[in-house]
Image (tube, coloured by chain):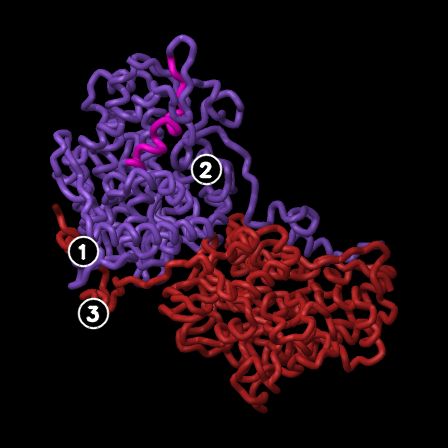
Chain colours: A purple, B red
Amino acid sequence: MTMTCPFHSVLNQALDLEGAGVGAEGAEVAPKKEFPFMPIGQAYDMGHAPDGTPLFDPRILDSAEFARNPYPYYRILRDHYPVYFDKLHNTYWITRYEDITRCYFDEEGFNTIPKGSSSGVLGNTQLELSGVEHRRRRNLYGRHLVGQALEKRIYAIERLADSMIESWLSDSPPPGVTRNADGTLTIELGLAFANEFPIRVVCQVLGIPDDVKDKFFYWYYSMMTGLGGSETAPNGIRARQDLEDYVSSLVELRRREPGYLYDHAGKVVGKDIITQLCESVLDGDYLSTEEITSNIALIVGGGGETTRGAIMNMWYLLLLHPEQFAAVSGDEALWDTAFHETLRCASSIGGQPRHNTYDVELHGVTIPAGSLCQMVDFSANHDDRIFADPEAFDIFRSDLYSGKIIRSGHHDDGRHSHMAFGVGPHLCPGAWISHQEAVVGSKLLRRRLKKVSIHADKMPKDIDGVTLPPIGLGAIRELWLDIELA
Amino acid sequence: MTTTDDLGSNLELPHLPRNVRDGSGLRTYEIYQRQRVRDATPLIKPRQLRSPEYLVDPYPVVEILRENYPCYRDWVGNSFWITQYDDVTSVFADDLNYETRPKLWYYDMVGFGRNLGNELAVLWNRSNTWQQQAEPLANKIIDEIRSLGNSTDLATEFVARYALELLALRLDLPRADFNSFVERYWRMQRGYLWEPVAAQAGRVAMGELVDYFRPLLEQRRTSPGADLVSVIATLELPEGPATAEDLVVTLLEEDHQTLHGAMANLWYLLLTNADQYALLRDDRRWVRFAYQETLRHSTPVISAEKFALHEVERFGRVLPEGALMYLSAAAANRDPRQFEDPDRFDVQRTDLCQREPRGTYRADGLPAGVAFALGRPSKYPAVPEDRPMSLWALTRDAVVTGSRVLLDRLPDLRLADGAQPSLRSLRWGEMHTCWSLPVVY
């Protein structure tokens, strides 16, 4: 066949018909693209503008490379596209610490009206409310998770951690615990402790009887994996329905027979949260079962995976930095610092969605009203405008605030609070209890340990098949340890 | 504890309307959107809507949506997919609740130039050029093709060239500049979507086109002809005379896809459906019907994006302000509620409106094929004497004229041996058409 008409080559050049177009079956042209794995901290070259500005391909956000090595890409966004409009996901990504702080405080300009993927499964929670409605609902249960109310619960948290560690030595140790011939143990920290511990604390705080604990794990797991319209969404929705059915029967019971919490002397220190919610009056009426369930679903969602991740990442990072682990071992007060630096360096939650109420111009980009603006907490925590050498894990860093968590955040004397809990009116209401769980549990565990080291053979490996994996986005799934109990 | 009010008052809020400042216009109460088990969408994964398969054949995927989830919430793309015919046309025609954003907005270049595409003189220019030039142009291209042998690629050598030369004729460009113009033009048209390298190249192309047109525009301002550049140069506009940027933006915003895409798809369908092809060869009257049926069966612009102007309650959902709606023409045009045996390419089908939809998509009580890029149904009940023909009618006539000339001049046109043509989008969001159609004659 003759093909001599010059126009053919013109169109070919313009459309690249023989390159990425007709010839290759979709690999380069569909929004799913395999990006090569890069060394940690180094970004794949997605092209450059004539002035040298690196280009950003939105497909990277869905890639395995990004999940493993996200920070160099966030750096490109912060440095060159502080407000990045991702047309593929119809999302504006906000990545600088200062901008995110401003947006979190601007409750009117960046609202939380329920358009989020979580509200489908969790139901309407105060995550999606603003202003006075938000404050009232949040305070209903938020007040049980802070201050004196929290102090009263610490004894129960300690006892729970102790009993879980004790069970490793029992005749039927929990899954993830192997007793070796020489008396040492090999444990997977998640299976043996971190997966279950926060959920059991939540159950206790809520007043869920022990006998439904297992079902509770299932509901929790299904709901968490069912967020975001994912393939497992039907399971999540179904689990949410089961939870609601169960909670409504529990609520009926608690309305008749209140549940109580006890201190070490067996004295009643207060009622459990469900009982208190049953007795709460809001806008002149008792809370409905639906409202109570939504709040419980939120507490369960917020209180489980996040704290698990904090414990796992904290131990992993400390054990990868033996000198810092030694310091923490020598001075228990440093656990607080280690907790905050862990959350700064590798937190479990990536950020929060907001929608702008009116047209906003930020860094020269006009965001039309109603757009989805994702506040990337991961990126804020690695913003080198705030934290020097942000990729390094360093509990002694001088620019991180690690005092008492406050809703206004902290940004004085050269120290900033990390963004893992957010800041402002929607600051994580579980921040304080999560802090206590992770620190109290870790302290107790550390006291019981004579020796501890990472069991490298059983750990998942990085792409080279040899070295330990980076944490990447979120939390590590497994942490295998060789330990010797005192 | 610090309250939110203390913190809020420290923030400098931009100048706002009163209902926003005092909070009375702000919604803070709950909208109940919790899903029940029956609301789950297990038959589809959002990734299927963005898969390589969708680029090649979107129809099976959108059929799942249309028949099961007519207003599908796509969490990955943060959007809603509307797929049934009545829903698609009603949203598309609803200016009060939804808006279309210009390509310049996607380019993040709002203010770069004015779109003069709705100026009457510009519309007359298109109408006159296409009506006068279509037939001679088709003959000229066929002359050239025939002089080169007895085989060619109909999609690129004829269809694409026909569409682009019609544009070049409107601009009255020197023959020597044609190739570089086409290359830049395509780069510009392909750049406004999500692909960053293409977006960068598109911006560069726009700059190059502005540099190219600036001297031409000045020259024709002083000695105008009948072409589009002269028309734009001599427009009297309230904000001052048109610039080269305005000309480029006008070219960017005008639909360039349907003439090219629908004609390629028409010939793809004819060459792969022998009985229908025979019908046209026997009686040219069917060419027009075939074009209509092509727009329905294999429309080149398979979806359009709309944004909700404010919160709308529709399709059993609260569609929030700013919500992105994908209107799927591919799904609507194969809606079995409207068309019998919708997957069949049938030139003689009687359930398709055969004239330009006017006012609604149901002129004559029949559904028309949804073809987004041609604009919405005209508000004029018939073409007024003093109005240029609509893009819808012009495109139809240009395709029909070109196709008639092809039928007349290359009467034994057929697929080359072993050719397996197919339709596909080159990139997600781009036109779905036939890019290679090897033929012999």
**Residue B214 horizontal/vertical position (percent):** 52, 64
Q: Give the chain letter at badge 1.
A: A
- Residue at screen point 65% across, 75% down: B339
Q: Position of residue A138 (x, y in %)?
A: 21, 51
State whether residue A93 is above or below residue B389.
above
Image height of B373 relative to A455, above or below: below
User: Looking at the picture, how far across and down is residue B223, in whole percent?
Assistant: 57, 75
The reply to whether label 2 and label 3 mark residues of one chain is no
Judge left or right: residue B280 versus residue A197.
right
Q: Which residues are magenta?
A: A184-200
Could you tell me the amino acid type at mark 3? Arg
Is A193 part of what is drawn in magenta? yes
- Badge 3 marks a residue whose secondary structure is helix
Give the mark nearer the N terminus: 1 vs 2: 2
* Element class at badge 1: helix
Q: Nearer the viewer, residue B296 or B125?
A: B296
Asked if the residue at tag 2 contacts the one at tag 1, i.e. Cβ–Cβ closer than 8 Å, the answer is no
Q: Are marks 1 and 2 on the same chain?
A: yes
Q: Which residue is mark 1?
A: A136
Residue holding disc 2 = A67
SS type, badge 2: helix
* A157, above or below B237, in the image: above
* Residue toward you, B91 or A390: B91
What's under tag 1, amino acid-wise? Arg
Q: Nearer the viewer, residue B250 or A294?
A: A294
* Dot 2 alpha-carbon crowd within 10 angstroms: few under 14, some 14 to 19, many 20 or more: some
Provide the residue designation for mark 3.
B18
